Image (cartoon, rainbow, N blue to C red):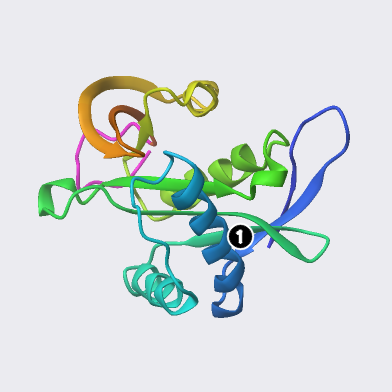
Amino acid sequence: MMTADCGDRQEHYMDIRDATEADMGAVADIYNHAVAHTTAIWNEKEVDVANRIAWLADRRRVGYPVLVAIEDGEIIGYASFGDWRAFDGYRHTVEHSVYVRPDQHGKGIGKALMLALIDRARQIGKHVMVAGIEARNIGSIALHEKLGFTNAGTLAEVGTKFGGWLDLTFMALRLDERSDPDGVPK
């Protein structure tokens, strides 16, 4: 478990730790809010706790983290990463997801979770972390830029939700400087 200072004007501390099955109810609530009210997730169907428990088990099985941010005993956000694409050639690249409870936005929680994820990706030897962000989500794009991600391009009208087309901006962060893909990360 780590304690994170979110860096805003008020001192705002939280714990970030690996998620457990007991956390999946709160994770499902955060996820379902994003499904129902935002274009952060391009799914239209909400999930139940059993779905999130299975998702957690899938992430653990391949050695990928699911982290939760906790303040005053409540889960206020979660984050994970998974394979970017399902082909061997992409084995050193992951795509991340970070979601914060809506009443906790703007407090640095997403940044703290992202920093923890970046550290975890480096620990397991990943080379690049990719972000797929709905192109009008200026706040998320700005956060990624502050963390060193670079804009890799935008795909127009590749998704749909709430009766409209969505554009997808890809951003990427190189996690190490190795020249040999299967060599030891530097």
Residue found 24% across the figure and 37% down from its top: 159
User: How many numbered marks have been drawn onto this rendered protein structure?
Assistant: 1
Judge left or right: residue 43 versus residue 14. Answer: left
Dot 1: element = strand
* Quadrant position of the C terminus in the picture: top left
What percent of the width, then of the height, locates residue 179?
22, 33
Residue found 38% across the figure and 21% down from its top: 150
Q: Residues within 10 Å of mark 1 (few under 14, many from 20)?
A: many
Q: Quadrant of residue 151?
A: top left
* Quadrant position of the N terminus in the picture: bottom right
Judge left or right: residue 162 versus residue 34. Answer: left
- Residue sitting nearer the eye, 137 or 93: 137
What percent of the width, then of the height, locates residue 83?
27, 53
The image shows residue 133, relative to residue 96, as above or below, that is above
Residue found 34% across the figure and 75% down from its top: 61
Residue 12 lies in the magenta-colored region: no
The image shows residue 107, relative to residue 31, as above or below, that is above
Residue found 63% across the figure and 63% down from its top: 17
Q: Which residue is mark 1?
A: 68
Label the magenta part by its dominant secondary structure: loop
Indicate the amino acid at tag 1.
Val
The part of the chain drawn in magenta is 176-186
What percent of the width, then of the height, locates residue 53?
45, 77
Please identify the residue farthest to the front as the structure is shown.
Answer: 163
What percent of the width, then of the height, locates residue 91?
21, 51
Judge left or right: residue 181 versus residue 128. Answer: left
Residue 178 lies in the magenta-colored region: yes
The image shows residue 121, relative to residue 20, as above or below, that is above
